[in-house]
Image: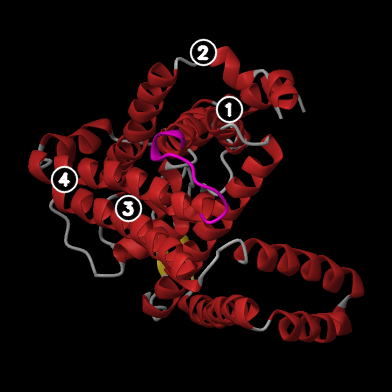
């Protein structure tokens, strides 16, 4: 599908999501919490958000430097410009742009640069899996989840029964835990895990077994780019640090709105956001970011008004959007790159 068509569809979807979320909004009720927000907590939330983007670069630095030395500046520019592109266009074109920028600045083959990008994405997913596991074992499933009428343009209240939540959460927690153990075991006992995977999954579907074998084999090959387990541990540590900084940014944001919330609130918000924004389908994640924030807030604090949750979502989106936009523009100016350089796929392929 042409990029122009994807962008048009993304803008259209964004408008639909915003219409669904804000159609029945009482704007006076929405503005009230915005006027009472704490500037100090808000500044702290933004500072933590900025910090997470520097930690993201350091995480990738351990991945890339395990294979060959690349300057922090080149890595920083590649990451920030790619995130800026993800804010402008959907379908994560930024991942391709990140590979292109790194290849151009570090003078390495484009295909090799893309491999580094893929490994970093895997590292990011590993940290998300940990966040999901914490969420699943901490979120209380003994109460119904209620979304009042008008929250998402629904005419009637929408209720998710606790009888459904608890077994689903338990099943997902077990699945995530098994996935984590399998990935750890894969690093130490690759042949054993692949044989076990073929036998167990092969009973259900030979096609699925072949696909999973290929995915796990590629992942194992990627992990062995690290010259030592210490380097891999540092990369994983900074991946967890990146998500921790984002979680603390959410905590500061909730504090800015004077909300009282349980300790697992940022983990639930991160889990839902991570799933909903894993693939960018709207420019700047407009609408795509707001709806999961509102849903998670109402799950955490059932007595919270939906309009107040929407006010939090608006500010949360701005805090998530400002760092990549500012740092991305700064990196483009510093590297003397033009916008046309980022969207000309022929140029990317030719340089690769």
Residue 326 position within the rendered picture, expressed as x and y whole percent measured from the top left: 33, 26
Residue 283 position within the rendered picture, expressed as x and y whole percent measured from the top left: 52, 29
Q: Earlier in the sequence, mark 3 or mark 1?
A: 1
- Pointer 3 residue: 246
- Pointer 4 residue: 44
Q: Is residue 147 visible?
A: no
Name the front one of labels 1 and 2: 1
Lateral position of residue 308 relative to residue 90, left or right? left
Where does the N terminus fall, quadrant-wise? Answer: top right
What is the C-alpha distance between the residues marked 2 and 3?
30 Å
Mark 2, secondary structure of its residue:
loop
In the rendered structure, which segment of residues is drawn in magenta?
A: 66-74
What is the C-alpha distance between the residues marked 1 and 2?
14 Å
Mark 3, secondary structure of its residue:
helix
Label 2 environment density (alpha carbons within 10 Å; few <14, some 14–19, many ≥20) = few
Residue at 46% of width from left, 57% of height from top?
Answer: 272
| Magenta residue check for 73 | yes
Q: Earlier in the sequence, mark 4 or mark 3?
A: 4
Residue 302 position within the rendered picture, expressed as x and y whole percent measured from the top left: 30, 63
Residue at 48% of width from left, 47% of height from top?
Answer: 155
Q: Is residue 326 visible?
A: yes
Q: Is residue 114 above or below residue 212?
A: above
Residue at 53% of width from left, 15% of height from top?
Answer: 339
Q: Which mark is residue 338?
A: 2
Q: Earlier in the sequence, mark 4 or mark 1?
A: 4
Lateral position of residue 34 relative to residue 73, left or right? left
Mark 4, secondary structure of its residue:
helix
Q: Earlier in the sequence, mark 2 or mark 3?
A: 3
- Pointer 1 residue: 104
Callout 4–callout 3 Cβ contact below 8 Å: no
Residue in the foreground of this view, choosing between 282 and 127? 127
């Amino acid at each position: 599908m042409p990029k122009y068509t994807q962008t048009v569809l993304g803008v259209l979807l964004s408008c639909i999501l915003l219409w669904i979320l804000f159609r029945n909004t009482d704007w006076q009720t929405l503005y009230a919490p915005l006027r009472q927000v704490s500037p100090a907590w808000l500044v702290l939330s933004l500072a933590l958000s900025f910090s997470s983007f520097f930690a993201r670069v350091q995480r990738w630095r351990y991945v890339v430097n395990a294979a060959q030395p690349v300057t922090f500046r080149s890595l920083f520019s590649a990451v920030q410009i790619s995130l800026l592109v993800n804010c402008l266009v959907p379908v994560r074109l930024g991942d391709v742009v990140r590979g292109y920028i790194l290849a151009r600045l570090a003078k390495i083959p484009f295909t090799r640069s893309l491999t580094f990008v893929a490994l970093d994405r895997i590292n990011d997913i590993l940290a998300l899996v940990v966040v999901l596991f914490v969420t699943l074992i901490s979120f209380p499933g003994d109460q119904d989840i209620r979304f009042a009428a008008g929250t998402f343009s629904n005419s009637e209240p929408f209720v998710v029964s606790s009888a459904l939540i608890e077994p689903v959460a338990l099943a997902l927690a077990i699945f995530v835990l098994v996935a984590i153990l399998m990935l750890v075991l894969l690093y130490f006992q690759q042949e054993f895990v692949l044989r076990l995977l073929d036998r167990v999954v092969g009973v259900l579907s030979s096609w699925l077994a072949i696909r999973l074998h290929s995915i796990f084999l590629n992942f194992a090959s990627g992990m062995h780019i690290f010259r030592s387990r210490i380097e891999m541990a540092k990369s994983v540590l900074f991946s967890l640090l990146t998500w921790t900084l984002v979680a603390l940014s959410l905590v500061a944001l909730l504090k800015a709105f004077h909300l009282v919330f349980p300790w697992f609130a940022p983990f639930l918000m991160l889990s839902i956001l991570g799933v909903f924004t894993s693939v960018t389908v709207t420019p700047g994640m407009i609408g795509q970011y707001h709806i999961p924030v509102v849903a998670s807030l109402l799950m955490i604090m059932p007595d919270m008004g939906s309009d107040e949750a929407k006010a939090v979502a608006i500010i949360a989106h701005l805090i998530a959007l400002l760092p990549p936009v500012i740092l991305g523009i700064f990196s483009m100016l510093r590297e003397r790159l033009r916008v046309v350089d980022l969207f000309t796929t022929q140029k990317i392929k030719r340089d690769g």
